[in-house]
Amino acid sequence: MSKSQAWIEQLPPAVHEWLAGRRVDEVECIVGDIAGIARGKAMPAKKFGRSDNMYLPTSIFFQTITGDYADIDSIENQWTEADLIMQPDFATATAVPWSADTTLQIVHDAYTRDGELVGVSPRNVLKKMVALYNAEGWRPIVAPELEFYLTKPNVNPDNPIEPPIGRTGRSGVGRQAYSMSAVEEYGTVIDDIYDFAEAQGFEIDTIIQEGGAGQIEINLQHGDPVALADEVFFYKRLIREAALRNDCFATFMAKPMENQPGSAMHIHQSVVDNKTGANLFNDAHDQPTPLFYGFLGGTQQHLSDVFCMIAPYVNSYRRFVRDDAAPINLEWGFDNRTASIRVPLSDPQNRRVENRVVGMDCNPYLAIAASLACGYLGMKNDIKPRDAITGDAYSLPHAMPRGLLEALDLFDASDDVRDTLGAEFCTIYRSIKHHEIEEFSQVISPWERDHLLLNV
């Protein structure tokens, strides 16, 4: 077999099944940037097979959500645009089923010329976090839940977001959580999501209607954090494509509509023994272990320190509204959906911790890394949680950062987080977020025009 064809043998079985003997026309070589946007290059499959390495400039990890570039004072010769070596992870190869050609997409890892993983790459940040667990003999398991809105096409950003028109010809309405009729209202989009996911080898656990107008939730099977982050990365793209095919938008904004609940990416987490596979949150008598309480305590203590990673934009903080399906403080409880940190109903062997704070606007690699970092620090340092809340957590005061600037201050002040996630990453992430805040502060909002233009 020629070198230009040998890489095809490394593709996962799901890809071979999808190809069914067809020739690959094009390969998309992609990497997730700080915002979670897919950056990279597309090339003919023949060229991909002949290439030893792909290169991308370091600046892809300095870009803000607007496409601007942040200045990083600590980086010498930042703008020489030195190349990074991008190496394919063939286990991530999957179909691009909406493409007219037979196209594959493959996630690449970023390396320096010395062969070191680039510390600022979000996927590498998560890999580092998983390696810290592995060094203790632990293996983290996660299961994300993806909430998003289907909306009318919004071509003028000055106009408010509106729910889409469903099959009845009427606009979607909210407060219809778990309604099968509401899911069927957008059945063609859901069908395309299922079809795309199946073609890509992904398994959806459940799809439900959430509480917002046109708001959908997809639950994924539990598994390896890096693999699940890859799936969320892919899912965001396939969901957008399914929506566009049906003349609507899909948005993962944390709070796209004023009078509707926000969208979260709840993360279910457990930790198993690397050798035996036993759940380390459960002991021989089916009781919670000290490691379970340490994970809870670390999450409760450090979640504010990584808040800027799980609520990464100015819009993210509009989601945390009392009595509106999002938490407002950092309490934990058993089977309590008003708490930030929930221990769901399960048999003892499946004891797990659900982080309900993370917004769907997050970068999945960074959000999962941040959430696992909190639990890791709690397990390592035997941090004790406060007593579980047994009532309505909304009855307690708001006790989490009110905005991105406050969250960044907490991020800067945490040596534990910096040591765990990596100093280089933390420096660059902070710089990018400050740059975005400066850009946002120069925008004049409709509220200002509405209330200040003629009244002050």
Image: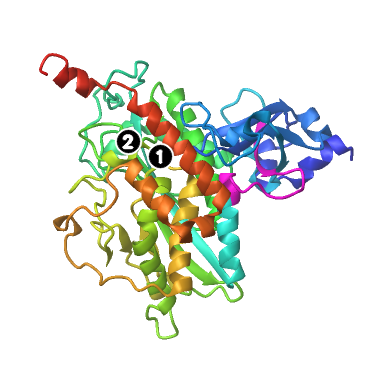
Report whether 55 appears left or right of 260.
Answer: right
User: In the drawing, does residue 35 fall left or right of residue 80?
Assistant: left
The circle drawn on residue 377 is none
| Position of residue 312 measured from the top left corner of the image (x, y, whole percent) | 40, 41
Q: Which of the 4 quarters of the picture holds residue 343?
A: bottom left
Question: Regarding mark 1 in the picture, which secondary structure is present there?
Answer: loop
Q: Estimate the x, y position of residue 274 in percent, counting from the top left.
A: 59, 71
Compare marks 1 and 2 and give the one earlier in the sequence. 2
The answer to which of 283 and 16 lies nearer the viewer is 283
Rendered image coloring scheme = rainbow
Q: Is residue 145 above or below residue 346?
A: above
Q: Amino acid under label 1?
A: Asp
Question: Is residue 104 one of those drawn in magenta?
Answer: yes
For the N terminus, which image quadrant?
top right
Depth order, front residue of 99/307? 307
Kindly give the residue lying farthest to the left in the view shown. Answer: 455
Residue 141: x and y in percent read 50, 62
Label 2 neighbour load within 10 Å: few <14, some 14-19, many 20+: some
Q: Marks 1 and 2: CB-CB under 8 Å? A: yes
Specify whether residue 373 is painted magenta: no
* Residue picked out by circle 2: 315
Q: Which residue is mark 1?
A: 361
Position of 363 relative to 455 (above/below) = below
**Mark 1 crowdedness (10 Å alpha carbons): few <14, some 14-19, many ≥20:** many
Give the residue at x 42% y 75%. 382
Label 2: state its secondary structure: helix
Query: Which mark is in front, 1 or 2?
Result: 2
Please name the amino acid that badge 2 sits on.
Answer: Asn
Stretch in magenta: 103-124
Report the residue at 30% width, 36% height from top.
Answer: 255
Task: Please tell me which residue lies in front, 149 or 25.
Answer: 149
Q: What residue is rendered at 20% in x and 52% in y?
A: 398
